[in-house]
Amino acid sequence: MLRVAGGASSVLVGVYIADLANRGRDIGAGLVGTLAAISFGAELLGALPLGMLSDAVSARALMTGGALLAGVATLLFGLTQDVSLFVVSRALEGLAAAAGVPALLAYLTDATAGDSRLRARAMSYFELSLLAGLALGGIVGGRLWAGLHTGAFTALALMYVVAALLLFVGSVGSVTHRGADVWQGLARALATPQLRRLAPIWICMNAIIGLWLGPTLYFLLTKRSDDSQMLAGLLADDPSGLGGLLFAYALVFGTGVLVWSRILPRVDLRRALGVSLLAMLAVSVGLLLLNHMGNQPIQLRWTLTAVIAVLIMIESGFTPAALSLLAGAVGPGVGPGAAMGIYSFLLSVGALIGSVAAGMAGRWLAIDGLTYATLVLAVVALALLPRLGPVPPLTPVLHA
């Protein structure tokens, strides 16, 4: 429910600002990218201290409080057309994510302490929850906008309240670590060589996430455009179509994650990361071709779309592999919230870079701009991958 609300919120922000632009307001992709960057920036600032806090207090309290704060932020956005209040709303949304995500990942790390193969599956399912949010969130956001217009933000705030209640009920028994262990957990996480080597690669990948899963893409798809690119303004006459598009993407990506959840426990994680990055390069090339095939036969366009879908399934292995690597390198028990705060911090740094890049690239080159930026980031990540060193397959921990 939390992921669905988050996905719907991102869609509504992009569609709302596109609607204001279509009605004559002098705003554009730059503002949308900036708002996404503010959200990720707030998450960046809050991730590490709030992650450490989840080791000192109940993860249950932080997850529940984060959901409620996100509801307040969403409600605020729909009550105004003032850009300054848009900024406040997105900052609160970022702080809500900083409170909830590290606490949830720390909870999962503790819960899978006895079996690293189970952890690989759990992290894959964590990624699936994000995809479910994208799929259903797009549909929910599109339908709420079509039926309620700006009232959609109020309805979405109520959904966050429901998510808070579910988190409160579902996280009974979460572990509270001793206060003294908070700093020990942070020190151990920072001293982990694999975490330091993974950090720049992780930032590149999260920058790509910021490029494509922020509101800039939704703005470009729903704002009317005279550009020759086939995908720019594709849904300008039917913004609710974003729901179907996101659902299809999440279905394809989720299928890939399910397959990877069975493969990851048996393979070198670095090799899995490399295969995923190569697939991402191929997806970018495919999108560039598809975006300029508006005059080509529809059969050819659908064939290329099918190839891109297969490649997306292959690239989907990166995040669960990286999460498994991080959780395994740091380990459970001593301050996992601090370690996952670092994860969230790196995620926010990358997403912040990607959001700013999306606003700039989208303003200059529309959909092509996002694709070129993705190519550059994927190449950088591939170049950094050999520094990670070999990572052995995951093996279960057996108990007497």
Image: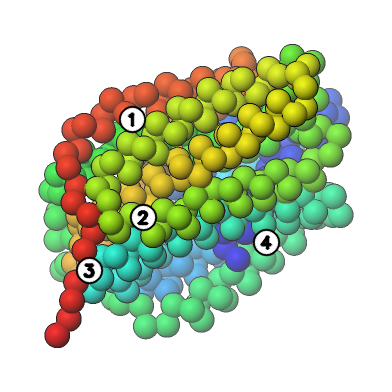
Give the residue drawn at x 78%, y 16%: 295
- Amino acid residing under circle 1: Ala
Which numbered circle lies on residue 263? 2
Q: Which residue in the structure is indicated by mark 1?
A: 381
Q: Amino acid at mark 3?
A: Pro
Q: CA distance from mark 4 to mark 3?
A: 41 Å
Q: Earlier in the sequence, mark 2 or mark 3?
A: 2
Crowding at mark 4 (Cα within 10 Å: few <14, some 14-19, many 20+): many
184, 259: nearer the viewer: 259
Q: Please count the marks in the image.
A: 4
Q: CA distance from mark 3 to mark 1?
A: 29 Å
Quick one: quadrant of the C terminus? bottom left
Quadrant for the N terminus in the image:
bottom right
Looking at marks 4 and 3 on the same chain, the residue that comes earlier in the sequence is marked by 4
Is disc 3 surrounded by few (<14), some (14 to 19) or many (20+) residues within 10 Å?
Answer: few
Q: Amino acid at mark 2?
A: Ile
Q: Secondary structure at mark 3?
A: loop
Q: Nearer the viewer, mark 2 or mark 3?
A: 2
Give the amino acid type for the residue marked by disc 4 in the picture.
Ala
Which residue is tagged 3? Answer: 396
**Circle 2 Cα neighbour tier, 10 Å, few/some/many (<14 / 14–19 / ≥20):** some
**Disc 4 element:** helix
- Against 111, residue 260 (above or below) is above
Say which element carries label 2: helix
Picture coordinates of residue 204 (x, y %)?
A: 38, 33
Is 212 located above or below residue 281 in the figure?
A: below
Give the CA separation, mark 2 to mark 1.
22 Å
Lower sequence index among marks 2 and 4: 4
Q: State the residue at coordinates (44%, 77%).
A: 171
Q: Measuring from the top left, give residue 340's x and y in whole percent.
A: 31, 56
User: In the picture provided, is 23 more to the left or to the right than 118?
Assistant: right
The residue sitting at 64% across, 53% down in the picture is: 135
